[in-house]
Image: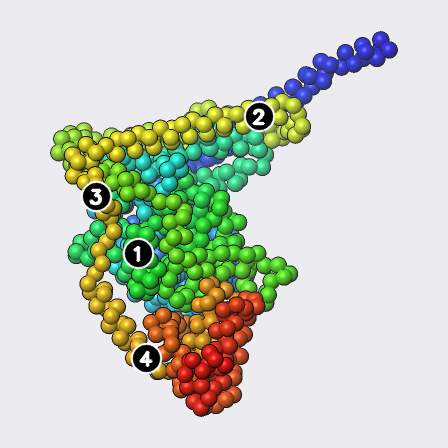
Amino acid sequence: MSSDKKQVSGSTPLNFFGPALEYMTDAAQRSVLFLDVMRQRSNQYRDHLAETVPHVLDYKAELVMDGRTLKRPVNYLLVRIVPPAGVEIDPARRPFVVVDPRAGHGPGIGGFKADSEIGVAMKAGHPCYFVGFMPDPMPGQTIEDIASAEAMFLEKVISLHPQADGKPCVIGNCQAGWAVMILAATRPELFGPIILAGSPLSYWAGVRGQNPMRYSGGLLGGSWLTALTSDMGAGKFDGGWLVHNFENQNPANTLWSKQYNVYSNVDTEAPRYLEFERWWGGHVNLNAEEMQFIVDELFVGNNLAAGRIEMSDGTAVDLRNIRSPIVVFCSKGDNVTPPQQALDWILDLYDDVDQIRSFGQTIVYTVHETAGHLGIFVSGGVARKEHNEFSSNIDLIDVLPPGLYEATFTRKSGDTTNPDLVSGEWVMRCEQRTLDDIRAMGANSPEDERRFATAARVSEINLSLYRAFMQPMVKAMVTPQVAEWLKRWQPTRLSYEAFTDANPLMPAVAKAAEEVREHRKPVATDNPFLVAQEKVSEQIVQALDAWRETQEKLSEKMFLAIYGSPVLQAAVGINPEAARPRRPGKSLMHRELVEKRIAELKSQIDKGGLQECTIRGLLYVGIARGFVDERGLEALRRIRLTEEESRMTLPQFKKMTRDQFFLLLLEPEATLAAIPKMLPADVGERRKALAAIRNVLSSGGEISGEAAERLKTITALFEAGDAGFPTIERAKAS
């Protein structure tokens, strides 16, 4: 018995020191390998910046247009994406044009990997183009110059695809989203559907206690700091500062988690980490004029949705001029562009859905529950689901009647009706919504709107003071050489530069890493010291998150207190009692055009034939459902493609659909009553059209409720012809 005790007692030091030595060996090896990953990251950073056209596209590309050769040169390029082996492109399908964000990083995030926006669009058979940019802007380049260049890019794409069934679908990621919307508002004829992914358009919007990034402009005193930063760069704004601002939103990830994840999984995590860091560290520059416009007009001034931005020729940028469907993809997990900033521009522009329809606009939105800002563009799961469905069903979106819709996705299963009509693994449905659905997500109070208006006015004053008293001195002191040194010492850039092979310690790290890989001894996952390491990491993350939350609460309180002061509001010319002053005015010309359009439509009530009647019947029944299912459009597309004699192009079908939709809204009784006399005398043709209506409506499931009653009405009208039921009342009575 005593000998057993001695044996146990004697093994205790081994039970302790054994795991300790194993952990220490593993930790030391991981430290060396981690430093080597940092070395590779820094060398990759330098190599990437040394490239003539640095990008992270995962596809081969062919140059189509070089913006540097234009009359007003810009550093933007249009390239055609070469389809990889095994991917077939349908020349009849509309092209996709992906515009990458110039927000501090280099281009390529839209085609970062196979499961990407470009990847899923090509998989659906669409030709793909990409709009990227060079690291440095052209001298004198402005935001308007870029818009002009992108208009020429779209004209070129359209000319290359005369056989395409529709204008290009344009994807604007993040900062590219507002740029695309500005261009679409001034050149609406160039666009097919527009997809905005994580794009801010209503910059003051938000909910108290969440996403306080919108307060930062006011807390810094406005855009004078932007001007100072540009002057310190000798007329260029270093994109590294934009990346720095993004990183400040999540200190736990920036200061700890991102690096710790590599350290703790150094044997497997390095390739993924280096792949992402190649884009994250690809910093680019903007001209001072460009960055000042972005901050003054958008993020601080919030002038886009308010219609207060003007082009050089005096043309006002009114988002209501856009005629293409607008798809807004946002996420509750996005702390850079929360759903309010992505969607509240709709509330700024319109009083109700009828106003949206009066401008002929179709707006579709979808809200992801968890995806972060970068996940909207980078996540393979998001690409395979949302982006894949948007790409596969872009024609459905294009022919939706004007209004407001939410896109919902249901996974295809064995119980799915007509699964052969579903293009991917998810069934997309566009459900009708009202502005109250957007308001329910949360919005500013009138008091908060006045606070932001006050901050914008303070920004204007501070910028004027800076330009009058400080800017001349700063410009005199900052030579190009000084600006270059300041750029090198920018904190975000310095974190990449520090570990290159130019550091005399790094070659020794590389050699040590080779030896470690030859003798690698990873510790067991149940090692108590490794478990303790994970616990410590969790506590560090919790502490940094707590610090972030404290800072966010404090910044919100400071902003609300400072800019909520009636004295300050009055001093800068904001009426403390005024109502929300941002909405663009209603145009008398628009009202006149709407009245003229209504008169034209009413004159077409009894004009047309079998096709008009078929679409009229589909819409009348479908409106009662309140949604449009992708299976219905696919069924209709197959019918359209088999009807050789009456085949319509997609634009023709879209126009006819919209005309019939508006007729049903304006004069529902007269529009239905006209069906019998518009139908051909051939009973077989009428029955065939009626069968097509039933087939399309039943493709997404059972026809029930009010939709079933409406289908009975349409059936009676189609079966009646000229003789049986000349009025809608008799059709309903049947």
Is residue 125 visible in the rendered image? The answer is no
Amino acid type at circle 1 is Tyr
| Quadrant in the rendering for residue 78 | bottom left
Residue 642 position in % (x across, y down): 51, 79
In what element is the residue under mark 1? loop
- Which numbered disc flags the more N-terminal residue, 1 or 3? 1
Check disc 3 and report the residue beneath it.
578
Residue 23: mark in rendering: none
Q: Which of 171 and 520 is in front in this view?
A: 171
Residue 135 position in % (x across, y down): 33, 44
Check disc 1 and report the residue beneath it.
350
Is residue 318 depicted above or below 103 in this figure? Answer: below
Check disc 2 and report the residue beneath it.
535
Is residue 150 depicted above or below 615 in this figure? Answer: above
Q: Nearer the viewer, residue 428 or 515?
A: 428
Residue 604: mark in rendering: 4
Q: Residue at x 57, y 25 (%)?
A: 535
Q: Are marks 2 and 4 in contact (CB under 8 Å)?
A: no
Q: Nearer the viewer, mark 1 or mark 3?
A: 3
In what element is the residue under mark 3? loop
Q: Residue at x 25, y 59 (%)?
A: 186
- Which numbered disc flags the more N-terminal residue, 3 or 2? 2
Amino acid type at circle 4 is Gln
